[in-house]
Amino acid sequence: QVQVVESGGGLVQPGGSLRLSCAASGSIRSISVMGWYRQAPGKQRELVALVSSGGTTTYADSVKGRFTISRDNAKNTVDLQMNSLKPEDTAVYYCRYAIYWGQGTQVTVSS
C-alpha cells in the first residue's frame, strides 16, 4: 500500500503565490510518474502538471509559465510552485503517485 499526502494549500490573493508539497510513502517498489490534478466545483478533475521519473514535465496550457513542478526521487516527493495565481485556479488540488491519489488540498484565490 502507498500513502500520498499533500500539504500547502490555502487562501491567497490574485497575483500571489503558493507552494504545494506531496509525499508518497509505503510499499514503493519503483520510481513512477508523479503529478498534480485539480477539481473545481461542478467541474471534472483535470491535469495540472506531471513529472516523469526522468524529470520530463508536462503542463496544462492554462498554467504554463506560471506553475513549476519538481520532484525529489530519493524522497518520493513532488512540489508545485504556483505563481501569478488567478481566481480560476481555485480548486481542490490532488497529488498522484502512479495509481495512488492523495486526499486533496484546497487552494482558493480571492481578494
Image: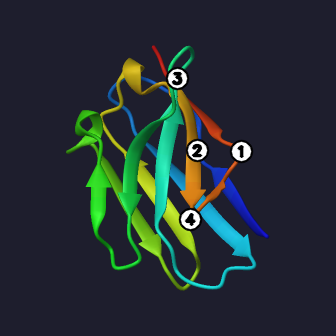
- Using the numbered discs, state the Cα–Cα distance from disc 3 to disc 4 in whole angstroms: 22 Å
- Using the numbered discs, state the Cα–Cα distance from disc 3 to disc 2 in whole angstroms: 11 Å
Between 47 and 65, the residue placed more toward the observer is 47
Q: Specify the quadrant that holds the N terminus.
A: bottom right
Which mark is nearer the camera, 1 or 4? 4
Residue 47 image offset from top left, x and y in percent: 41, 42
Which mark is nearer the camera, 3 or 4? 4
Asked where in the image residue 23 lies, by quadrant, the reply is bottom right
Secondary structure found at label 1 = loop
Q: Are marks 3 and 2 in contact (CB under 8 Å)?
A: no
Secondary structure found at label 4 = loop
Q: Is residue 63 left or right of residue 95?
A: left
Residue 11 showing in the rendered view: no
Sequence-earlier tag: 2 or 1: 2
How packed mark 3 is, by other alpha carbons closer than 10 Å (few <14, some 14-19, many 20 or more), is some
> Label for residue 40?
3
Residue 38 image offset from top left, x and y in percent: 50, 36
Residue 98 image offset from top left, x and y in percent: 56, 65
Residue kind at label 2, given as amino acid type: Tyr
Sequence-earlier tag: 1 or 4: 4
Q: Are marks 1 and 3 in contact (CB under 8 Å)?
A: no
* Residue named by callout 1: 103
* Residue named by callout 4: 98
Between 24 and 87, the residue placed more toward the observer is 24
- Using the numbered discs, state the Cα–Cα distance from disc 2 to disc 1 in whole angstroms: 7 Å
Residue kind at label 3, given as amino acid type: Ala
- Using the numbered discs, state the Cα–Cα distance from disc 1 to disc 3 in whole angstroms: 15 Å
> Label for residue 94?
2
How packed mark 1 is, by other alpha carbons closer than 10 Å (few <14, some 14-19, many 20 or more), is some
Q: Above or below — where is 51 with respect to 40?
A: below
- Using the numbered discs, state the Cα–Cα distance from disc 1 to disc 4 in whole angstroms: 15 Å
Q: Are marks 2 and 1 in contact (CB under 8 Å)?
A: yes
